[in-house]
Image: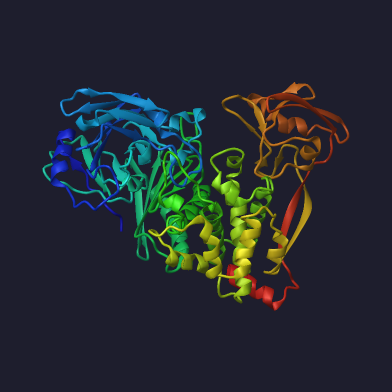
């Protein structure tokens, strides 16, 4: 059953806010802050100017001389500094008479306001991120979009900030929008009385218990294209924006329902939400539109960005992989999480050691449920494991995962972040196999996660240093030993050893490759900003590039005196087809701003491919482990 968001039409936006401030007060719980007044925020999506929207923040009864207002530097679920204050312009403060109050800006995300006993409100304009992604690193599903009268992606932390010491205060949020656009969100809209209606604009009102709830509830405004369904006791809403109407929610819904139903069957009695909303933005992928494809999880929703040009089949496949991962985040870290996540500091973050649990386990479950629920074949499941092993091999295996996690925001560790989806999933796979073997198949990783959910849960965070002990108490000493050796220390994992426990043979073979691409994975990419050709790959380079001495991140300048850039990048593939084995070849590259020459002879390029197959000579014990592991 679709949740209907009722809109309130009003003539005077400010008048409605004033009415609600007095008519919708609720009992305040004791909070540890300098002031317990409700913070009132308004966002105007009607009077968009220069691709910016105006935000107004009201607060009463401050008793300090100064206070700071912040936009987040980073938010939960992301592992890089985004500095959302960079997108705020012209922040001003006013007293009750409308007079200006002195404001000083410090860094990208903090504004210090003086004479705050007289403070009535602050106002500012917010720019979006989707149309300027060449100039920053904000991942699209983490960012914001402003297209007047068409689409607004409101990751609310990009628009609404918090006062120092007041993150536990309640928030009332008013969003003025054109009446032909509707909100899609998991948070319920609240109706209020005494509203004066017009035919052009509406005001939606939402209430949040604290700032963390503001951060956790994205909202999308667009012309309605929604579909809803119910899986057991969970209401699912799918809302999409497709500029050219290429895709419709009704066509996507059947696959989403099938997938989430399978996920719910996989999870069993794990259930931490009654509603879940999928906000899907389909991008043109042009330079002035979102280009970072993927999703960002929230407790009861996810923001997904994918290319509009995908076929319906490819879109369904991408959504299955992306949304299934995000949906499993309702378990980790949204249910099971550390103190660093529970008490998240948006501007001086302290990161948890256990990214392998939050992202690795989630990614592993997103693969495992598909094989156990019959959505993919055993061979397809093995291919995904192979992909994870190959992708993880391109990262530094000498870094302990806990060390990398704790320092993920700084060099050199942040360059290894993507490995949490690769090796992190493989860590979880090995743990699952160990537990299946030790328990004669009856206890696996999902059972462990269920027990940890009971031990901790949404409101009881764990201490990073105590997690491994808790895991051992709820599983086996061998599980703790694995984590101590391969996660908390830097000993590489012998995947052959663990897969053999399930009767899966691990081997390698050399497969022929092209010089600059293997199957659909190119070894080079072009930079829209610098127009340079850069060596980069999700899989290890082929034998030719390795022997030549090419490293990821090298910039290709020329080959045998022919220069290459973004404009002629595709010449690489045609030119290399004309090379002859044994010919001399000279690459000019730039590495760390130094020009280098690499010389070699042309050799036949090959890729070392991993092979996984079921052992025909597997023991009964191995067969049992495999059966219980993947429901074979």
Instruction: Return the x and y of residue 291 as percentages of the image width and height.
Output: 50, 36
User: Would you say residue 370 is visible in this rendering?
Assistant: no
Residue in the image at 25% along x and 47% along y: 207
Instruction: Return the x and y of residue 522 as percentages of the image width and height.
Output: 67, 39
Instruction: Classify the position of the N terminus by image quarter.
Output: bottom left
Q: Nearer the viewer, residue 44 or 419?
A: 419
Residue in the image at 35% along x and 65% along y: 233
Instruction: Classify the position of the C terminus by image quarter.
Output: bottom right
Q: Nearer the viewer, residue 551 or 97?
A: 97
Q: Nearer the viewer, residue 498 or 233?
A: 498
Quadrant of the rendered image containing residue 538: top right
Question: What's the colour scheme?
Answer: rainbow
Residue at the right extreme, as displayed: 582
Instruction: Return the x and y of residue 100 as percentages of the image width and height.
Output: 23, 23
Name above or below for residue 391 compared with residue 378.
Answer: above
Residue at the left extreme, as displayed: 194
Q: How many marks?
A: 0
Left-right relation of 271 to 12: right
Name above or below for residue 474 compared with residue 523.
Answer: below
Left-right relation of 62 to 302: left
Instruction: Return the x and y of residue 77 as percentages of the image width and height.
Output: 46, 47
User: Would you say residue 264 is visible in this rendering?
Assistant: yes
């Amino acid at each position: 059953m679709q949740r209907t968001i009722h809109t309130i039409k009003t003539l005077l936006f400010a008048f409605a806010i004033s009415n609600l401030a007095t008519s919708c007060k609720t009992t305040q719980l004791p909070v540890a802050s300098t002031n317990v007044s409700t913070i009132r925020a308004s966002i105007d999506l009607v009077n968009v100017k220069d691709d910016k929207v105006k935000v107004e923040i009201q607060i009463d009864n401050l008793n300090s001389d100064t206070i700071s207002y912040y936009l987040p530097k980073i938010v939960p679920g992301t592992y890089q500094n985004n500095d959302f204050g960079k997108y705020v312009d012209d922040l001003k403060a006013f007293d009750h008479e409308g007079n200006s109050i002195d404001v000083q800006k410090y860094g990208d995300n903090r504004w210090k306001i003086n004479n705050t006993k007289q403070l009535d409100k602050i106002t500012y304009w917010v720019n979006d991120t989707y149309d300027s992604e060449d100039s920053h690193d904000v991942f699209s599903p983490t960012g914001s979009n402003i297209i007047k009268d068409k689409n607004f992606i409101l990751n609310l932390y990009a628009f609404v900030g918090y006062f120092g010491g007041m993150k536990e205060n309640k928030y009332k949020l008013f969003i003025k929008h054109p009446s032909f656009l509707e909100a899609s969100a998991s948070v319920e809209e609240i109706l209020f009385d005494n509203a004066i209606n017009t035919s052009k604009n509406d005001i939606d009102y939402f209430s949040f218990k604290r700032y963390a709830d503001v951060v956790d509830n994205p909202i999308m405004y667009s012309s309605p294209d929604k579909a809803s369904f119910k899986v057991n006791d969970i209401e699912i809403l799918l809302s999409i924006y497709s500029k050219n109407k290429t895709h419709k929610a009704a066509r996507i819904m059947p696959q989403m329902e099938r997938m989430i139903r399978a996920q719910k069957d996989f999870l069993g009695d794990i259930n931490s939400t009654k509603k879940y909303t999928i906000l899907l933005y389909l991008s043109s992928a042009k330079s002035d539109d979102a280009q970072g494809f993927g999703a960002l999880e929230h407790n009861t929703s996810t923001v997904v960005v994918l290319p509009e040009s995908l076929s319906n089949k490819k879109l369904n496949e991408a959504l299955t992989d992306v949304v299934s991962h995000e949906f499993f985040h309702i378990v980790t870290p949204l249910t099971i999480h550390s103190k660093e996540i529970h008490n998240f500091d948006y501007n001086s973050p302290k990161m948890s050691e256990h990214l392998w649990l939050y992202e690795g386990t989630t990614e592993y479950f997103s693969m495992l449920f598909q094989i156990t629920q019959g959505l993919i074949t055993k061979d397809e499941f093995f291919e995904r494991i192979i992909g994870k092993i190959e992708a993880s091999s391109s990262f530094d295996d000498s870094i302990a995962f806990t060390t990398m996690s704790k320092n993920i925001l700084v060099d050199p560790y942040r360059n290894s972040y993507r490995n949490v989806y690769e090796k992190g999933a493989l860590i979880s796979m090995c743990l699952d196999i160990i537990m299946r073997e030790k328990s004669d198949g009856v206890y696996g990783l999902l059972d462990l996660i269920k027990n940890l959910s009971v031990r901790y849960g949404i409101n009881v965070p764990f201490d990073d240093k105590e997690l491994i002990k808790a895991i051992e108490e709820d599983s086996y000493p061998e599980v703790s030993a694995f984590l101590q050796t391969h996660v908390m220390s830097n000993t590489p994992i012998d995947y052959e050893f663990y897969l053999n426990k399930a009767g899966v043979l691990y081997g390698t073979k050399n497969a022929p490759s092209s010089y600059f691409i293997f199957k659909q994975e190119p070894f080079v990419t072009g930079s829209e900003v610098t127009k340079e050709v850069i060596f980069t790959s999700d899989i290890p380079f082929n034998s030719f590039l390795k022997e030549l001495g090419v490293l990821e991140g090298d910039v290709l300048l020329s080959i045998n005196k022919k220069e290459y850039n973004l404009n002629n990048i595709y010449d690489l593939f045609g030119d290399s087809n004309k090379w002859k084995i044994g010919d001399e070849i000279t690459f000019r590259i730039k590495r760390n701003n130094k020009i280098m020459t690499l010389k070699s002879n042309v050799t036949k390029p090959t890729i070392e491919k991993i092979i996984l197959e079921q052992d025909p000579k597997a023991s009964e014990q191995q067969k049992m482990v495999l059966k219980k592991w993947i429901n074979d």
